[in-house]
C-alpha cells in the first residue's frame, strides 16, 4: 500500500484549496509514467485524507504498482514539490 507522509498530505490539501470542495488529487499512469491530476472521487478508489478531508485518490488499476512507494514532500529552489520514493 502506498504510504503518504504528513507533509505530502498537507501540501495536497493546500493545492486543493483553489479547487471545488469535491476535488481530490489522483495518481494516474500516462505513457508509463505516474502523474498527479485534479479529479473527483470514483467508486472503488483507495483514498488518503488530511485533517478529515480526502486529498488523494488512487484507482484499483494503479494501486498495486504503488505498494512499495511513499509519496513525500521535498524542498526545491522553486518551492515544495511532491516526490514519489521507494520505501
Image: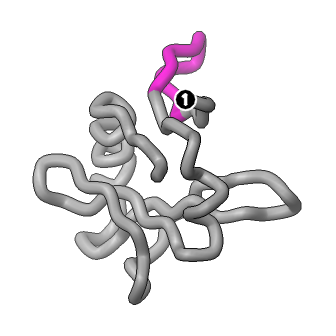
Location of the C terminus (image quadrant): top right
Q: Quadrant of residue 56?
A: bottom left
Q: Which residue is mark 1?
A: 87
Judging depth in this view, the residue of 78 and 2 nearest the camera is 2
Q: How many marks?
A: 1
Judging depth in this view, the residue of 60 and 53 nearest the camera is 60
Determine whether 30 is above or below 84 in the image.
below
- Secondary structure, mark 1, is loop
User: Residue at point 72% right, 63% down?
Assistant: 29
| Label 1 Cα crowd, 10 Å radius (few <14 / some 14-19 / many 20+) | few
Residue 8 appears anywhere in the view? yes
Residue found farthest to the bottom: 43
Residue 75 part of the magenta segment: yes
Residue found farthest to the left: 52
Q: Is residue 86 left or right of residue 38?
A: right
Residue found farthest to the top: 77
User: Residue at point 46% right, 30% down?
Assistant: 72
User: Residue at point 56% right, 40% down?
Assistant: 69
Q: Residue 81 in the image: x percent, y percent?
A: 53, 29
Determine whether 70 is above or below 43 in the image.
above
User: Residue at point 28% right, 33% down?
Assistant: 6
Residue found farthest to the right: 31
Q: Residue 80 in the image: x percent, y percent?
A: 47, 24
Q: Is residue 48 left or right of residue 74?
A: left
Determine whether 79 is above or below 8 in the image.
above
**Majority secondary structure of the magenta segment?**
strand
Residue 18 appears anywhere in the view? no
Q: Residue 9 in the image: x percent, y percent?
A: 32, 41
Residue 30 part of the magenta segment: no
Magenta highlight range: 73-82
Amino acid at each position: 500500500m502506498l504510504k503518504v507522509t504528513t507533509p505530502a498530505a498537507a501540501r495536497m490539501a493546500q493545492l486543493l484549496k483553489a479547487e471545488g470542495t469535491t476535488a481530490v488529487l489522483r495518481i494516474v499512469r500516462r505513457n508509463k509514467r505516474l502523474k498527479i491530476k485534479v479529479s473527483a472521487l470514483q467508486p472503488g478508489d483507495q483514498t488518503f485524507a488530511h485533517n478529515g478531508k480526502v486529498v488523494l485518490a488512487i484507482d484499483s488499476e494503479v494501486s498495486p504498482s504503488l505498494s512499495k512507494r511513499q509519496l513525500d514532500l521535498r524542498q526545491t529552489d522553486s518551492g515544495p514539490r511532491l516526490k514519489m520514493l521507494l520505501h
